[in-house]
Image: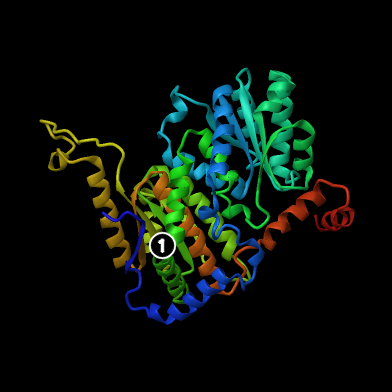
Amino acid sequence: MNDKIQVISKYALEGLNAQALNDAALAAKQTLESGSGLGNDFLGWLHLPSSIDEQQLQAIEQTAAILRQECEYVITIGIGGSYLGAKAIIEALSDHFAAYKCGNGPKVVFAGNNIGEDYLYDLMDLVRGHKFGIIVISKSGTTTEPAIAFRLFKEMLEKQEGKEFAQRNIVAVTDARRGALRNLATQEGYATYVIPDNVGGRFSVLTPVGLLPIAVAGFDIRALVAGAVEMEKDGDEQVLNYAIARNALYQNGKKIEILANFAPRLHFLAEWWKQLYGESEGKGHKGIFPASVDFTTDLHSMGQMIQDGERTIFETVLSVGDQQHEVIIPTDEADLDGLNYIAGKNVDYVNKMAELGTRLAHVDGGVPNLLITIPAVNERYLGQLIYFFEKACGVSGYILGVNPFDQPGVEAYKKNMFALLEKPGHEEATAAIKARL
């Protein structure tokens, strides 16, 4: 078995001249690694894994240990890249039904990633009467969604457990020197960690943004980082394979990439991936639209569209090798369900045959399939996968001809929202919008 993730394009590039993109991909990789391209002030993630030292890991583990000891819940507050990476890793490594079980250590829950009033009410109701801590993640401290959540839960924690407990169990991950959250953390004496200036949110999983919540959840951040280091040092072949294949397909009219998995625990990994590629490539009225499905579940909902719908899509399948547990299908004497033909097989064998059968069916139906194999779902291989997707995203964005590291379009909705809320300083925009309504 390979000890690294692998990209297999056997069922993706039939009839395409992907080799024609080889020079463009090598040039894009050179642009990325030399720091000569657009967005080169946000390349801090590129050599981040190998730069993380023992002192940094120990500090994060010590802070996590305090929160794990004192809290029943730890609320991680952030939006976009400030929560999706941690959520993806924690969900991938957790027991599927951890929320329903009592266990060691606190439950890590998330807020500030939406403005749902009922969501916030329900979360406040959940932690009411329980000791909880807060990890608040924001460079500025003024982003609307996390700022609202932090104001609510900070006040709640101080009233419920007292100022001293709150000061000890609120951790701010923010800018090194400036911003509202940095100023508040200094004023209140919170433990703090820095979001590097040269690392954008969607590339920040391997900074304290992701590492601290993952450590609080009880997972091995050292193995996660070690896996990323492996890909940093020896992952370029797979990075180029993926970047070349997806751009070759895009140039051949495949405008939508569906990331498919057959492992329910990878659902939020796909959510993180969607932000990474959507926010990085969707510019200048071009870019591959990132979508995701959970198979076999979605074969009973989206399968028809994928099999027989418009031929503008391709699939990238995340295929997991070893499972953590084995469940054997029993024999039934009556065999009323007709399953005795697979009795004695483990469930994953059936799932793997469903995976292969689906890939072949979709290829036969005109849906090219890329395959990314993951030896197992653990910290090491998730670290590999995170770094692999990040670097492939940088290379792919440069092949596409965009700046993969900015997100100018994200500001449009904020300007309208602030105007509608009549935020001071937006009077002219408020008047313009009211005239349109």
Which structural element holds mark 1? helix
Q: Is residue 268 above or below residue 22?
A: above
Identity, as a three-letter code, of the amino acid under mark 1: Asp
| Residue 28 visible in this rendered orientation of the protein | yes
Foreground residue among 151 and 68: 68
Q: Would residue 173 appear left or right of 339 to someone viewing this image?
A: right
Quadrant, the N terminus: bottom left
Residue at the disc numbered 1: 234
Residue depicted at x 78% and y 46%: 179
Instruction: Classify 10 Å Cα crowding around label 1: few (below 14), some (14-19), many (20 and above).
Output: few
* Residue 135 falls left or right of residue 361: right
Q: x and y percent of residue 208 in the render?
A: 59, 44
Can you say whether 160 is above or below 181 in the image?
above
Quarter of the image for residue 79 reads: top right
Whether residue 83 is visible, yes or no, is no
**Closer to the camera in the image, 231 or 404:** 231
Q: Does 16 sit above or below residue 164? A: below
Q: Where residue 131 sits in the image (x, y, percent)?
A: 61, 21
Choose between 13 and 205: the one closer to the eye. 205
Residue at (58% x, 30% y) in the render: 74
> Residue at left 50%, top 26%?
105
Residue nearest the viewer, comparing 118 with 83: 83
Residue farthest along the left direction in this orientation: 333
| Identity of the residue drawn at 56% across and 69% down | 32
Image coords of residue 323 (percent x, y): 30, 42
Find residue 402 and report its horizontal and vertical position in percent: 60, 71
Total marks placed = 1
